[in-house]
Amino acid sequence: MIDKIVPDLAAALAGVGDGATILVGGFGETGVPFALLQGVVRSGVRNLVLVSNNSGVADKGVSQLLQLGRVRKIICSYPRSAGSVVFDQVYARGDLELELVPQGTLTERIRAGGAGIGGFFTRTGVGTELTRGRETRVIDGQTYVLEHPLRGDVALIKGELGDRWGNLTYRLSARNFGPVMAPAATLTIAQVRRIVALGDIDPEHVITPGLFVNRVWACDE
Amino acid sequence: MIDKIVPDLAAALAGVGDGATILVGGFGETGVPFALLQGVVRSGVRNLVLVSNNSGVADKGVSQLLQLGRVRKIICSYPRSAGSVVFDQVYARGDLELELVPQGTLTERIRAGGAGIGGFFTRTGVGTELTRGRETRVIDGQTYVLEHPLRGDVALIKGELGDRWGNLTYRLSARNFGPVMAPAATLTIAQVRRIVALGDIDPEHVITPGLFVNRVWACDE
Amino acid sequence: MTTDLRHRIARRAAHDLPDGAYVNLGIGLPTLVAGHTPPSREIIFHSENGLLGVGPPPPPGAEDTDLVNAGKQPVTLLPGAAVFHHNDAFVMMRGGHLDYALLGGFQVSAGGDLANWSLGETTKAPAVGGAMDLAAGAKQVWVLMEHTTKSGEPRIVERCTYPLTAPGVVRRIYTELAVIDVGVELVVRELADGITFGFVQARTGARLVAVK
Amino acid sequence: MTTDLRHRIARRAAHDLPDGAYVNLGIGLPTLVAGHTPPSREIIFHSENGLLGVGPPPPPGAEDTDLVNAGKQPVTLLPGAAVFHHNDAFVMMRGGHLDYALLGGFQVSAGGDLANWSLGETTKAPAVGGAMDLAAGAKQVWVLMEHTTKSGEPRIVERCTYPLTAPGVVRRIYTELAVIDVGVELVVRELADGITFGFVQARTGARLVAVK
């Protein structure tokens, strides 16, 4: 019998180790799997590479990992925002490698990682310093730049409903990166607000089919 | 006021002309917009390029267009199947150009066409005659082939519910190519089983957001 | 710039959005446009985090932390709205499905180059978000900005000195002084009340021409 | 091949699918596997047209033309099933998310090359469907086929003479005579009742070795 539901945070994060590349869902504070991130903090793992649209606000989640010096590199589109105090400090100290990627290219690179695409051409970023020196190609008279897939050892995402096969729904704009990241990691872990019985989610309303998800943990957050 | 609902088949197909490249939704007979195709037959347009997973069964839809000699070229993955009698005849006569594309590459090329991707690398088809002579590249030790986006002048798809903003749902496996093709054409036309009031489709259950759809026509099929 | 001037720019741009337009509003000044669209027109606002049909902010107390816009501010959904994931949101941008992106700007060049994401500082981290995707992908890019910097330097220039967001993409500029079309030339389409062409030209770093 | 033999091959392969496996069944013989999985195991079947959690065929009269599998036959959905569009269905294949693809075969080479989509005829149109995507994308490809052609020619060969579906992808072959692992060598893992190694070797166009 398939049962992807795990009883606690420790079981949810088992095997997440030093040096892992972790895809972290969320946009601003919306859809961020804070409880899972709190568990990563407590687990003490270090030397992490994080892939996350933002770099954390205030002192929780990604910010806390940054503050504790657990992150070697962050790949994101918008690290600096209102409340990204910790990031600003850590970055200013030179203690963090930053790979800045346009948001649409970030999500497309993650999508490619999950979809078995070896690379793709996009017009985004052409003629800017973010693509300087990169391979370009003129296609139908337009210049495109080649971008590469991005995968994680782990994805941490936040769903609304989950079942024992790993099927997920999301709530409103908390959906954001969850469905994109779930297919792109070797180990995809979802915190959900509620576990439901198999079949309770209408097959047509499943947003992330269970085969993209390894563990589901219910968390009242 | 936005109102994408059209009153009849003629209005649905206005502007679909000779030489058009038409993306046709459906898999086998499921999700095929037969009523729209019937309209295309009646309109008399010719010299068409069709993009369709299959090549029609029996004597309706794509088959009928083939039989009447309206199709110059078909781009598909599985033209020959039980009941594809018309295709077999027309093809044997040499009256039809066929571009055969692996199904996953077909859907990914259409997806790229709608997503502004200039090209992508896939492992599908590498080392086979379907990619012979094509540009390849070794990425992380694996050989990939470069594939190009595919767009239509027109997309004909079949939805379940539609509203005046063009939002669509689909029923069960009739979803297939609809959501993939809708973004990839200049003019996307949907036949739907039922028109509903704006707001009747839960925003979280919209499968094809209205901006990908130009016309919605209710049809009891 | 005063709040009143900012709203005046936003209102002017809102006036030019046609019925049925799909529009993305950049953070900052462009966000104000949503409050100024004529009620007779249906304009569908897109948010990069996966929303189409974004409505006005909720009344105080009715905010939902799961429903925010690109600026992370609470929003509502209109009837007919759709929710989708981040990748689909950028398919809409990159795939050319949005009619208009209304963006803020640091500089716009005579050739329509846009610089709006980085001041080229080396001590602070850069942050780009969806700026490059919108600039490269929308059918039309309009820039809403103050005509000059706080110290009076022109923002409309021969060549951008700040890092580019995208080259050759801006079609129109709205400032507190004028509405300027960007094409082969910079054409002043409209002057604000009481403003002369010469006054605008004196505050612009590239050659303007008057509309014919 | 008799229906009984076909079912025997399908049953044998079904026996090797572990609990919790995500499996795509090719049309033809592999389709029979669904009817033979041990009830103690949950196997999740994927269909290329956008279904996961495919159940048994509906009872006569309960068919739904909107609910079919890759072979266009009516199916049902199990509790826990998911419906998605065609592109996502192939993301699952191409992205390596399916544990097993069980496919039919015309020929398999000693190196694991698979030929199962075309007989190389020039008068009839070729048709590939999802065969190449599955062969290139699934974590493991197992081929279920008759050991020889109707005229007695081996299907397991040194080099395929039919057009390839994908090179070097087959990990295991199930026939009515044997179960053969494809690796550095072709290892006969198991012989059917009453069949000898020599009998199988005589009907195989490449060198076999016995399992150690």
Image (tube, coloured by chain):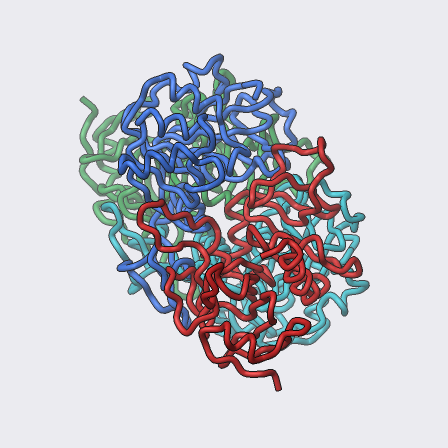
Chain colours: A cyan, B blue, C green, D red
Q: For the N terminus of chain A, give its image quadrant.
A: bottom right
Identify the residue at the far front of this view.
D151
Tell me which residue sits at (59%, 33%) in the image.
Answer: B170
Q: Residue D30: x, y in percent?
A: 60, 56
Name the residue nearer the viewer: A120 or B37: B37
Identify the residue at the far top of this view.
B7
Tell me which residue sits at (35%, 17%) in the image.
Answer: B43
Q: Residue B169: x, y in percent?
A: 59, 32
Quadrant position of residue B121: bottom left
Quadrant position of residue D191: bottom right
Seen in the picture, residue B132 relative to B32 is either above or below; the reply is below
Whether residue B137 is visible here, answered yes or no, is yes
Q: Is residue A149 left or right of residue B167?
A: left
Name the residue nearer the viewer: D174 or A172: D174
Name the residue nearer the viewer: A83 or B198: B198
Q: Residue A128: x, y in percent?
A: 32, 55
Total residue callouts: 0
Whether residue C162 is visible here, answered yes or no, is no
Name the residue nearer the viewer: C171 or A216: A216
Q: Is residue C10 left or right of residue C74?
A: left
Seen in the picture, residue C121 relative to A141 is either above or below; the reply is below
Tell me which residue sits at (43%, 48%) in the image.
Answer: B108
Q: Is residue C106 left or right of residue C81?
A: left
Seen in the picture, residue D199 relative to D20 is either above or below; the reply is below
Q: Is residue D30 left or right of residue B34?
A: right
Quadrant position of residue D179: bottom right
Q: Residue A2: x, y in percent?
A: 75, 60
Tell me which residue sits at (18%, 30%) in the image.
Answer: C209
Identify the residue at the far bottom of this view.
D212
